[in-house]
Structures are given as structure tokens and as C-alpha cells.
Amino acid sequence: MNLARQDVHDAGVPEDEVGRDGAPGRCDEVAEGKGLGEISHAPKSVRQTAARRDTLVKTEAGLSTSFPIRDPQSGAYTRAFFDEIVDREVERSRRHGSVLSVLSIVLANWSDVTRAAPVSVVDDAVRTVAGTLFANLRMTDYLFRWEDDEFLALLVEANLDGCKLKVARLAETFRPWREGKGPLPQRIKVRVGAGVLGPGLAFPAVLHMSRQAARDTSGEMPVLRV
């Protein structure tokens, strides 16, 4: 299992601590593109681009144009939409011999952040986290609101090296947040787990291990550190 885990508290593991598991596919970086930003507050041109993509993916999935696919609070795709498109994306990666990667982004202290907080504060925090994630993903990637304290991203054409790069960049982005030096007044601790789907691996196992890696704090799990 090719996995990457990063806690922003201990980012920057020395090179000799990086796992040696290889991942199939090209050893290229994930190309960075323009993020969607927070959908409802994004510029009109970005919202239009997102709307066109939503129409396209609904058509490919055979969904009604009225089928709600975005979480109204965060602007990310819904978990129900994930269920509609994941098999197609996995099959596409198999058919074309490409690589599909999974990122689990967990807000480790979310219960502390939201405890007794006004709804407006929680909404602002969710929008800000989602907007930051959108800005660090490509237009071809998918971002889902998985649980109240978790987002899930599907990275298309992203191999192990791409996952390592993405996890490291997210760790660097969110590092100040845990000290209350981010765009929000609250301290938010973000953990990221990543998995790469390759030959011989079942997607549910990659998904499970990626999510487990993001939530694991024991250091005993055999994950690939970056």
C-alpha cells in the first residue's frame, strides 16, 4: 500500500525516513492549476467554469441536471456525488493506465473549534478551509465534504511523487493555522493522509487506509511519510 501521511506539526521528515515503496506511473509532479476558490464567493468567471464542469460531470454520470452535487456550506462536492462517480473514475484510471490518488484532510480539533461557537463562525471556518483546499487543487481534481471534520480529494493523474508533493504543500499551507496565525482566529490542526491506486490494489482499501492515515496519531501504522 502506497501511502503518505502528514501532520503539519511534524512536517519535513528527513529524506532517510521517507518510505521506499514505489508507485506505478510516471514520476512527474502534479501540475498546479487555478483553484476554484470558495464557490459561492468566487469571481463570476470561476463560478461559471465550475458550473460548466458540474454540468459535464453530471452528464457523464447520467445524473439529472437538478441533482444536488455540492455541499452548500463548503462548496465542495457531496459524499452522495462521490458514490455516483467513483466507480467511473476508478475504471477510467484502469482503462487508461493512469494513476488515481486519494487525499483525506482531517480537521483534528474540529470539535474544539465548533464547541459553543455561533453558526456564523462555524460556517466561516468551513468556507475558509474549503477555499484553501480548492486553491491548492487543480480544476481536474475533485474535492468532497466527507464528514463534518473531513474533506476528501480525488487527484486525477497524480502518482506517489505527486501525492508527496501535494501533502507537503498542504502541510506548509496549514502549518500556521495550528498556532492561530492563519486566516481564522481559531487554532485549527490539519492532518492529511494520502493513498495511490495502482495495479493489484482495490480502491476501497486505498480509501480506507488514506483516511486512517490522516487520523492515526500513534506513529505505529506502516504509512509512507513525506
Image (cartoon, helix red, strand yellow):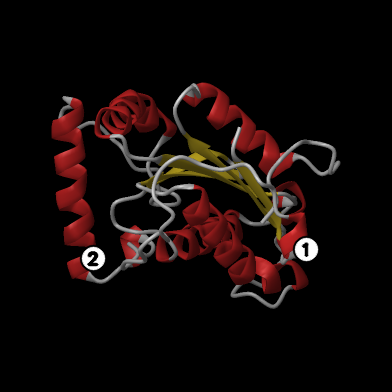
Kindly identify which residue carries mark 1: 9
Q: Which three-letter amino acid code belongs to the residue tagged 1?
A: His
Residues packed near mark 2 inside 10 Å, few (<14), some (14 to 19) or many (20 plus) = some
Q: Is residue 222 left or right of residue 196?
A: right
Q: Position of residue 193 (x, y in %)?
A: 62, 45
Residue placed most toward the observer, 132 or 128? 132
Residue 43 in sight in this render: yes
Residue placed most toward the observer, 11 or 177? 11
Q: Outermost residue, bottom direction?
A: 181
In the image, what residue occupies the spot 73% across and 47% down?
Answer: 111
In the image, what residue occupies the spot 77% across and 56% down?
Answer: 17
Residues packed near mark 1 inside 10 Å, few (<14), some (14 to 19) or many (20 plus) = some
Spatial CA distance of label 2 from label 1 is 33 Å
In the image, what residue occupies the spot 62% across and 36% down?
Answer: 211
In the image, what residue occupies the spot 63% across and 70% down?
Answer: 172
Kindly identify which residue carries mark 2: 46
Say which label, 2 or 1, has the lower sequence index.
1
- Relative vertical location of residue 168 with respect to residue 163 in this rendering, above or below: below
Q: Quadrant of residue 125?
A: bottom right
Q: Position of residue 135 (x, y in %)?
A: 41, 66
Q: Which three-letter amino acid code belongs to the residue tagged 2?
A: Val
Q: Secondary structure at mark 2?
A: helix
- The C terminus lies in quadrant: bottom right
Q: Is residue 200 left or right of residue 18?
A: left
Q: Secondary structure at mark 1?
A: helix
Q: Position of residue 103 (x, y in %)?
A: 53, 45
Q: How many marks?
A: 2
